[in-house]
């Protein structure tokens, strides 16, 4: 077996990771712009509170069902590595079938439950009304979102992350335009306020699904994969997609529950401490996006090489991707540690919150050093089909170590916010070590 020079590994990794990072980054920009537009409505306090509830509900649902991309991605990457292009197309077709059926069912239930659920979680009736309207319109787009997710997994698997980048730029630009039109009632559209943000996002999501359909019909893809000429229902493929995807879905839910619990724990310490925690978490989510891009790259490269039975190269790609991603988190960690106050100014200009958050961001910066390793090796394991193991590593390190330790140090021992946050690097280090050793020792065959 011929191994490539290290520079060639780096080129291939960055070729896949950088467009994925660009596509993910556009989502962050839209989130900030949407909040800014809603924050300029007359009843901004109610509107922002309602949007917060709506975005959280959307995030929870999307976190669960977006794992369809992982199942599609892993399976297509392996088939592409085998050189079986027809199987890639059949996998996409069955993934789209899943997306349409599941998306329609979820959308119906979510739309029917939108107003009752919003009223239940909102303490204020006005907030509940606005949140219900946002959720109603936003969840109409779930079928389109899942179709886009299926296409995303397909294009990731065939090494075309640039398609996701173009999709992200176009869709999120349309998202901003449509939200502006419907939030403020511009260009002849009705003024809908918070509800307009939900409707604008749904229309943009429908355009995203249409964009992918147009791309897949281009001659370069139509002739190679013959996608819709191989349209047939294959229950073995559907079963495999679900087997890979479901543990990822539950893992995403556990991460959400863990961080919501952590925010609640910091609220027991104090209001300003909770505000500082939310600011730091917002900062971290911005910094985590490139790590997810490297995760997409390693999932593709490991899956391709497992499919072509080049297990040693698959393993090498995991380690080389972890190195590159760690350079990024090392730089960020240094920035967080040396000038935390300037980083925090991106999120808030409240000096009291910044003062409380500064030492916390330094702890987060230390944890950041290990985060890339965890993300990369976890995605590598998912590409090898070890999604259940990764999920259990998350459950143990997050819900059984991170959350209880944060409560024990911050609340029970009354050591305060700083020590509650010490639980974060403990969680990330344990998780990263576990997935590193599993990746290194447990899955590789001889070429």
Image (tube, grey):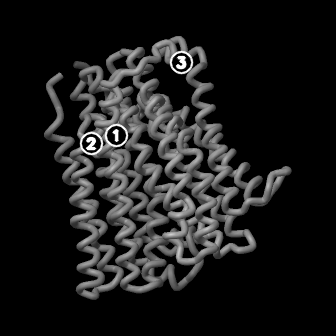
Q: Are marks 1 and 2 in contact (CB under 8 Å)?
A: yes
Question: Dot 1 lies on which element?
Answer: helix
- Residue 267 is left or right of residue 222, and the answer is left
Circle 2 packing at 10 Å, graded few (<14), some (14-19), many (20+), is: many
Q: In front of the other: label 1 or label 3?
A: 1
* Image quadrant occupied by the N terminus: top left
* Image quarter of residue 209: top right
- Residue 342 in picture, x, y percent from top left: 53, 72
| N-terminal label among 1 and 2 | 1
Choose mark 2 or mark 3, whichever is in front.
2
Q: Which mark is residue 245?
A: 1
Distance from disc 1 to disc 2, alpha carbons, whole Å, reads 8 Å
Tell which of 337 and 367 is nearer to you: 367
Q: Is residue 241 above or below residue 374?
A: above
Label placed on residue 221? 3
The residue under the point 56% across, 52% down is 111
Residue drawn at x 33%, y 36% as measured from the top left: 242
Percent across and percent down for residue 125 are 60, 75
* Picture quadrant where residue 238 is located: top left
């Amino acid at each position: 077996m011929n191994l490539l020079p290290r520079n060639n590994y780096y080129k291939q990794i960055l070729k896949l990771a950088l467009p994925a990072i660009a596509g993910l980054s556009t989502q962050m920009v839209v989130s900030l712009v949407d909040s800014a537009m809603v924050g300029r409505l007359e009843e901004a306090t109610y509107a922002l509170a309602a949007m917060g509830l709506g975005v959280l509900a959307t995030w929870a649902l999307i976190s669960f069902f977006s794992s369809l991309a992982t199942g599609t991605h892993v399976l297509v990457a392996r088939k592409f590595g085998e050189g079986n292009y027809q199987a890639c197309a059949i996998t996409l077709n069955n993934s789209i079938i899943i997306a349409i059926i599941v998306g329609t069912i979820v959308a119906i239930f979510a739309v029917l439950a939108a107003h009752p659920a919003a009223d239940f979680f909102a303490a204020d009736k006005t907030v509940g009304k606005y949140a219900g309207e946002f959720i109603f319109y936003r969840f109409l787009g779930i079928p389109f979102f899942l179709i886009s997710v299926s296409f995303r997994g397909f294009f990731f698997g065939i090494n075309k992350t640039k398609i996701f980048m173009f999709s992200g730029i176009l869709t999120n630009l349309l998202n901003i335009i449509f939200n502006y039109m419907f939030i403020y009632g511009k260009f002849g559209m009705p003024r809908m306020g918070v509800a307009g943000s939900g409707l604008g996002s749904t229309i943009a999501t429908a355009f995203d699904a249409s964009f992918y359909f147009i791309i897949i019909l281009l001659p370069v893809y139509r002739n190679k994969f013959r996608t819709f000429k191989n349209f047939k229902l294959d229950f073995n493929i559907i079963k495999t997609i679900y087997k890979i995807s479901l543990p990822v879905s539950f893992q995403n839910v556990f991460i959400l529950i863990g961080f919501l619990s952590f925010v609640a724990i910091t609220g027991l310490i104090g209001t300003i401490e909770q505000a500082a925690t939310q600011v730091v978490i917002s900062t971290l989510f911005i910094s985590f996006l490139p790590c997810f891009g490297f995760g997409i790259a390693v999932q593709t490269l490991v899956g391709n090489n497992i499919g072509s039975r080049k297990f040693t190269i698959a393993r090498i790609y995991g380690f080389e991707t972890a190195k590159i991603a760690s350079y990024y988190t090392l730089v960020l960690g240094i920035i967080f540690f040396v000038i935390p106050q300037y980083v925090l100014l991106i999120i808030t200009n409240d000096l009291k919150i910044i003062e409380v958050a500064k030492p916390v961001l330094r702890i987060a910066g230390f944890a950041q050093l290990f985060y890339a390793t965890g993300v990369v090796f976890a995605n590598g394991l998912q590409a090898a089909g070890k999604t259940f193991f990764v999920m259990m590593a998350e459950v143990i390190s997050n819900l059984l170590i991170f959350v209880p330790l944060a409560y024990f140090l911050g609340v029970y021992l009354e050591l305060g916010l700083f020590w509650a946050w010490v639980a974060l690097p403990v969680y990330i280090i344990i998780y990263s070590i576990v997935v590193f050793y599993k990746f290194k020792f447990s899955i590789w065959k001889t070429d």
